[in-house]
Image: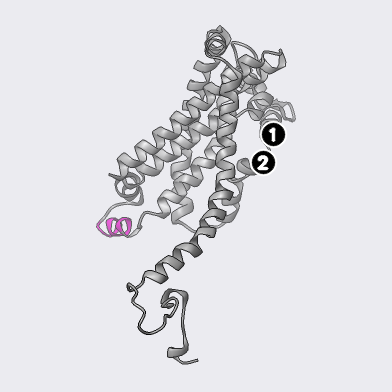
Amino acid sequence: MSQTETTSCAEDPGPQHEAGQHQEPGQPYELGRRRSDLPFFLVMSGISGLFVVLIALLIAADLMFTSFADFTEALGKPEIQAAFRLTMLSCTAAAILSIWVATPLGYLLSRYRFPGRWLVDTLVDIPIVLPPLVVGLSLLILFHLSIGDWELEAWLRDRVGFPVTYRWPAIILAQFTVACAFAIRTMRVAFDQIDPRAENIARTLGCTRGQAFTQIALPQAYRGMVAAFTIAWARSLGEFGPILVFAGATRMRTEVLSTSVFLELSVGQLNAAVAVSLLMVAIAVAALLLLRFLGKGLNA
């Protein structure tokens, strides 16, 4: 086929008109294109809008179900206030630990090809795809698995004096196990977007690998670190299954907001459960808005 016979939709001059008819250049084509684009946007926006409307209806249903008086009454309970404080502390601790692990591991997975890399890449994704209850059960088995006469939980309790299972450290560990996987993925993407030539030039000028990482790569990855921290924190907020299995849901001891919803439902306090759910929604929205704000500020 010759070049003159090759046409495309971008080169289509639109409908041809009879000679002698006055018409603005490009007007019929633009009008026809707008008409042909209308079904496209209707279908795309219709499909996309279904999910957006679903989320909006879920939040609206919670707001309509409970009153402001029920909300303040539920949040005034000492158990809910203690769960709120423990949630804030545990989520922050889990997010900090996630950043400490995700930053070097994300850098290694982004920059280097080493034996067993595919296996490491697969293992760090397992907490993302595993059912949450399985993660909690696996943690429980790990700490109570007897190897001869030795058991990790017994050793921590008797020798170290730091028991973990069914106490507050178990909450942080359960949140960290899942949240760190998301932080690793975020940090790997952040390092993938950084050109490694600056690090290579720094090494030719005498910098070690460690100096090139801390002085060149790490400062450029701060946006990714902020995003990874926020994602890990928000993911920790929503953890329920691993915490319930590994840490339990004891009032004033190992109760966080996610388990508060479960406990309130178990005693028939539906209004209190919805109030705690709305509190978690507000915290999650605040975390997302903070991520958007910091992202815009860092991009400026």
The residue at the point 58 percent across, 10 percent down is 79
Dots 2, 1 in contact, CB < 8 A: yes
Residue 37 spot, x, y in % from top left? 49, 62
Q: Is residue 200 magenta?
A: yes
Q: Residue at x 61, y 42 (%)?
A: 128
Q: Nearer the viewer, residue 21 or 87?
A: 21
- At 46% across and 68% down in the image, what residue appears? 32
Which of the 4 image quadrants contains residue 262?
top right
Q: Main secondary structure of the magenta part?
A: helix
Label 2 crowd (10 A; few <14 / some 14-19 / many >=20): few
Extent of the magenta region: 198-205
Residues packed near mark 1 inside 10 Å, few (<14), some (14 to 19) or many (20 plus): some
Q: Amino acid at mark 2?
A: Leu
Marked residue nearer the N-terminal end (2 or 1): 2
Q: Which residue is mark 2?
A: 130
Marks 2 and 1 sit apart, C-alpha to C-alpha, by 11 Å
Residue 9: image x %, image y %? 47, 75
Tell me the SS state at disc 1. Answer: helix
* Mark 2 or mark 1, whichever is nearer to me: 2
Q: Which residue is mark 1?
A: 138
Figure check: 217 above or below 273: below
Where is residue 96? Give x, y as percent. Answer: 45, 31
